[in-house]
Image: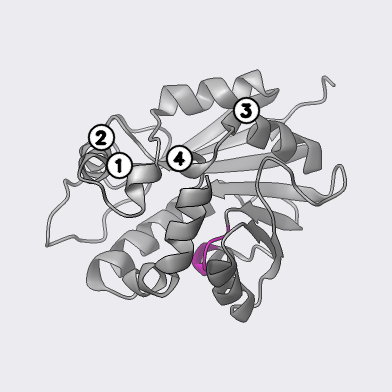
């Protein structure tokens, strides 16, 4: 975990600038639209675990974020996010503080996913929603990022990529009820990416899948 934090810290500016590149702009628009389909019924305040440089938080109206990498956190703070230096395994917030908790491209980097889901549930209000956005390992895009991992990419070599089934199992074991999906990025990786349709529901082979899981009342 220390290694991945240091990697994000070292490449903070480069990572953030990627979103302004042609590929980054196209992917970001689709991902934001897919996430947006699932948050309409969630009540603020929102928290993003692994807020990164705050790109998603700012666009989605997420007010709070935690992140262990100081240089990355500083960029998020400049974007107006209320940030704290912390990890998802130990959230510095009281029980039932948020109506929505977001894990966007973060799950693949956490050390103890079960603990992160447990903490997410703790800080969610009853009926609140957990939004998990992943690069689907069982897609062409998942294959691309797995290849980057094996090629010792400075950031992705630290990642563990998940299938949709694995993420669903993690959420349900933590006491959430999966309620909805959204999917996009069905085109293969290429140098000529285009803005494609965002689907409500789970599309097999989609590169980006977003899951809404609701905190249940069975505690």
Q: Which residue is mark 1?
A: 207
Q: Which residue is mark 2?
A: 139
Alpha carbon separation for disc pair 4 and 2: 15 Å
Q: Quadrant of residue 26?
A: bottom left
Alpha-carbon neighbours of circle 1 within 10 Å: few (<14), some, or many (≥20)?
many
- Asked if residue 129 lies left or right of residue 23, the reply is right
- Tag in front: 4 or 2: 4
Check the image and name the residue furthest to the bottom. 78
Alpha-carbon neighbours of circle 3 within 10 Å: few (<14), some, or many (≥20)?
some
Location of residue 144 in the rendering, given as x and y in whole percent from the top left corner = 21, 43
Alpha carbon separation for disc pair 4 and 1: 14 Å
Q: Which residue is mark 4?
A: 108
Q: Which mark is residue 114?
A: 3
- Asked if residue 91 lies left or right of residue 87, the reply is right
Badge 3 or badge 4: first in the primary sequence = 4
Tell me if label 2 and label 3 are in contact, CB under 8 Å: no
Badge 4 or badge 1: first in the primary sequence = 4
Tell me if label 2 and label 1 are in contact, CB under 8 Å: yes
Q: Which residue is pictured at 35% across the width and 72% down the height?
A: 14
Point out the stretch of residues depicted in magenta: 51-56
Task: Identify the element where label 1 is drawn.
Answer: loop
Task: Identify the element where label 2 is drawn.
Answer: loop
- Asked if residue 14 lies left or right of residue 76, the reply is left
């Amino acid at each position: 975990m220390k290694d991945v934090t240091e990697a994000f810290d070292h490449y903070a500016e480069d990572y953030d600038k990627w979103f302004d590149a042609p590929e980054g702009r196209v992917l970001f628009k689709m991902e934001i639209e897919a996430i947006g389909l699932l948050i309409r019924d969630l009540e603020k305040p929102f928290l993003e675990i692994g807020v990164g440089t705050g790109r998603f938080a700012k666009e989605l109206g997420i007010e709070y974020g935690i992140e262990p990498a100081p240089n990355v956190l500083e960029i998020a703070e400049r974007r107006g996010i209320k940030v704290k230096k912390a990890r998802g395994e130990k959230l510095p917030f009281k029980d039932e503080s948020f109506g929505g908790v977001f894990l966007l491209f973060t799950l693949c980097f956490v050390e103890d996913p079960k603990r992160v889901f447990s903490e997410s549930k703790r800080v969610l209000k009853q009926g609140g929603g957990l939004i998990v956005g992943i690069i689907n390992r069982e897609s062409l895009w998942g294959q691309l990022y797995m290849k980057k991992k094996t090629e010792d990419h400075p950031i992705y070599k630290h990642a563990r990529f998940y299938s949709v089934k694995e993420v669903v199992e993690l959420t349900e074991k933590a006491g959430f009820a999966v309620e909805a999906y959204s999917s996009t990025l069905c085109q293969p990786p290429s140098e000529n990416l285009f803005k494609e349709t965002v689907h409500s529901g789970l599309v097999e082979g989609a590169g980006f899948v977003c899951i809404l899981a609701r905190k249940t009342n069975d505690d």
